[in-house]
Amino acid sequence: MIQPQLAIPGWMRVISTIRKDNPQSLTELTKKVDMTYQHMCRLTHELKVRGIITKEEDGRIVTINLTPKGNKVCDACDEVFKYIKNEEVGGN
């Protein structure tokens, strides 16, 4: 039986991309995860409020970095994805 693909939530795509290419400008990040700039602004605000990212402004450039808490969240997401992938290929 073929199982449908799970959609990866936007915030997971964002923190995963930041981790892979840390640090990111807000504009670069928006392009890489294919979101509107407005959506990215709202999402990164929420991630900052939760202590997952930091936002540093230098004039008009906003740079995004993961916090230590953000790295732990990424680690947990990686474990979830490994579990799901294992289940999809028939593992236990």
Image: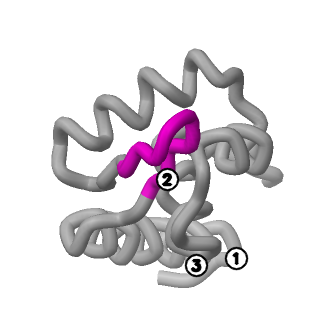
The percent position of residue 2, horizontal first and vertical second, equals 81, 52
Q: Quadrant of residue 45?
A: top left
Q: Secondary structure at mark 1?
A: loop
Marks 3/1: CA distance?
Answer: 5 Å
* Residue wearing tag 1: 89
Would you say the residues marked 3 and 1 are in contact, meaning their CB atoms lie under 8 Å apart?
yes
Please tell me whether the stretch drawn in magenta is mainly helix, strand or loop. strand
Q: Please state if 70 lies on the left or on the right of 90 as rendered.
A: left
Q: Nearer the viewer, mark 1 or mark 2?
A: 2
Quadrant of residue 57 in the image?
Answer: top left
Identify the residue position indicated by label 3 in the image.
86
Task: Decide whether residue 50 is among the magenta residues.
Answer: no
Q: CA distance from mark 1 to mark 2?
A: 38 Å
User: Seen from this angle, which residue lies furthest top?
Assistant: 38
Specify the label residue 72 is tagged with.
none
First in sequence: mark 1 vs mark 2: 2
- Asked if labels 3 and 2 touch by Cβ distance under 8 angstroms, the answer is no
Region of the chain picked out in magenta, as a range? 56-64
Measure how far apart labels 2 and 3 are at the Cα level: 35 Å
Is residue 63 one of those drawn in magenta?
yes
Amino acid type, callout 1: Val
Query: For the point 57% across and 83% down, which residue is it?
Result: 91
Classify 10 Å Cα crowding around label 2: few (below 14), some (14-19), many (20 and above).
some
Q: Reading the chain from its start, which is encountered first: label 2 or label 3?
A: 2
For residue 63, which numbered disc appears in the image?
A: 2
Which one is in front, 1 or 12? 12
